[in-house]
Amino acid sequence: MRLFLLLCFPCLLAACFSAQRTAPESSVYDFGLVNETIRVKTSIDFGRITAIDAIDHRRIRYRLAYQNPAQIHTYAHNRWADTPASLLTSKLHSEFDPEQSASCAIQIKIEGFDHVFSSPESSSGIVQLHVGLYSKLSQQILESNLLQATFPAASVDSKGGVEALSKASSEVLMKALRWAESAATTNSACTPDRS
């Protein structure tokens, strides 16, 4: 029996090392470095960005829409460097230049933030935001809207999903600010009488 164990031990050891070599490496993602010299000016100030509880974590979510669009999966060996709300906050401040003296601001809540597979060979990053325009003086919500952006992924893996979510995030943030600017022009709380 002892001889059998001695003979088996090197095989078990080799199997362990082999498993360690083939185990997938963990990856941590954010939206990459941003060129802050190119910033879009906006007449709206920024409020807080939050997220629904199901998204308020660092796991990278994906959905197999061709099988069951209601089922949520997460990548086992990949995660965000920070929560989606923090990542979008950084993107908002690095890509847009707000008018700090504006009477109104936007607050954003992330409703959807998923890498969605329409088929095994095709996927997209989809970001949904609930955007509220509010008066900085009264802190009251004046108008709100649900906005979405979809961007195709270059590859059907976590790397492709992250890149697509970053692009979709930039697109939907631009939509949010343009919508808020338009709404503010027709709201008296955002256009005080300067006479």
Image: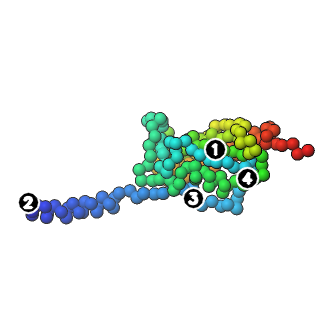
Q: Which residue is mark 4?
A: 98
Badge 4: few (under 14), some or many (20 or more) residues near its Cα, within 10 Å? Answer: some
Mark 4 or mark 3: whose residue is earlier in sequence: 3
**Which percent across, then down, holds residue 50?**
59, 46
**Position of residue 43 measured from the top left corner of the image (x, y, whole percent):** 77, 49
Would you say 43 lies left or right of 63 here? right
Q: CA distance from mark 2 to mark 4?
A: 76 Å
What is the CA distance from the residue labelled 4 to the residue labelled 3?
22 Å
User: Dot 1: what SS?
Assistant: strand
Write down the residue under mark 3: 32
Task: Measure the C-alpha gap from mark 4 to mark 1.
Answer: 15 Å
Whether tag 2 and tag 4 are in contact, CB under 8 A, the answer is no
> Which one is earlier in the sequence, the residue at label 2 or at label 1?
2
Q: Secondary structure under badge 3?
A: loop
| Amino acid type indicated by mark 2 | Met
Compute the Cα span from label 3 to label 2.
57 Å
- Secondary structure of the residue carrying tag 4 is strand
101 relative to 68, above or below? below
Q: Please state, as top left, top right, bottom left or bottom right, where the N terminus lies in the image.
A: bottom left
Mark 2 and mark 4 lie on one chain; the one further toward the N terminus is: 2
Three-letter code for the amino acid on which mark 4 is drawn: Pro
Write the residue at 57% across / 58% down: 32
- Say how many tags the image has: 4
Viewer-nearest of labels 1 and 3? 1
Name the spot of residue 58 as percent of width and height, x first: 49, 51
**Is 193 displayed left or right of 89 in the figure?**
right
Which numbered circle lies on residue 28? none
Give the residue number, with chain letter if any, for mark 2. Answer: 1
Mark 1 or mark 3, earlier in chain: 3
Say above or below: 71 vs 164. Answer: above
On screen, residue 40 versus residue 128, left or right, reads: right
